Amino acid sequence: MNTTLEDIARRFAEFYLLYRNPSVETDLTSDTALALLLEVVRSAGFDANHIEVGRLYQSNRHEDILINTNCPFRVIDSKRKDSSKTVCTSRGDASIWMTEWLDCVFLLLNRKTDWGRNTVDTEDIARLIETEIKRAQPLPLIRITDTKDCLGEIPPRKDIPIDRSLPGIFNHTKNTDTIQTELGIHTQYGCEGKIFIRYSNDTSRVATCEKCGLQIIFPKEIQTYGELRNHFTALLEQKT
Ligand SMILES: [Zn+2]
């Protein structure tokens, strides 16, 4: 896993340096370039279908806001498998969130290299990319029943990015994070309800889904999402 991620980050770093080098003419639309960027976006946990060269706008009542101000790429989500380049020139067709993230990674790289003017070690850039890919990865689903119900993270709030100048970059829940009363999202059978810790006694905590009523019980001493994952993994292994 880490070897693959390191490899993707290093190849993206090499591509970025070529892309920023004025003496090298980079073919942005080459299959290799677009496939690499797709690999980067997917490894960050996004459900992307493909990547195109083009602008992406978010329309609101008064104006159209350009999303990718720092890179010429827009990311198309997997629900639009039929989207052609022509269709996607219309506004808002592609995923705003995914494009915003990729654009912010380009912004971070631009800042680190002073828009390509500074010589920066490829490995330094690769490390920055790897950090952002890992930051963007959502908490892997925690299986909580033997009928495939899972607990997913509460998605990060879009109005609080890690930095106002980086509107596409958020911190996600990690295995090492302390569990919250608003425990997560019930991700099975299309429920998508929030699971809350309702009460605890001397030994256990009880959490229920606000939408379908699914109830889970786990030991009170569990502190983190990683511990919660280990608990349910062990419990479900016993049952099989
Ligand atoms: Zn539910």
Image (spheres, grey):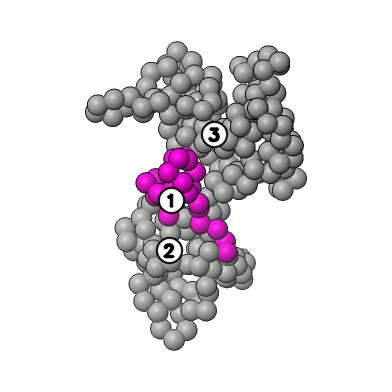
Q: Nearer the viewer, mark 2 or mark 1?
A: 1
Q: CA distance from mark 2 to mark 1?
A: 13 Å
Residue extent of the magenta highlight: 154-176
Q: Circle 1 — which element?
A: loop
Label 3 with label 2: CB-CB less than 8 Å:
no
Residue named by callout 1? 156
In the depicted structure, whether residue 31 falls above or below residue 235: above
The residue type indicated by label 3 comes to: Leu
Rendered residue at 65%/27% (across/down): 117
Quadrant of residue 20 within the rendered picture? top right
Q: Earlier in the sequence, mark 3 or mark 2?
A: 3
Residue named by callout 3? 107
Answer with left or right where residue 41 lies relative to residue 2: left
The residue type indicated by label 2 comes to: Leu
Q: Circle 2 — which element?
A: strand
What is the x, y in percent for residue 140?
56, 53
In this view, the residue in front, 60 or 108, is 108
**Residue 175 part of the magenta segment:** yes
Residue named by callout 2? 183
Give the quarter of the figure containing the C terminus.
bottom right
Q: Nearer the viewer, mark 3 or mark 1?
A: 3
The residue type indicated by label 1 comes to: Pro
Residue 187 visible, this angle: yes
Label 3 with label 1: CB-CB less than 8 Å:
no
Q: Nearer the viewer, mark 3 or mark 2?
A: 3
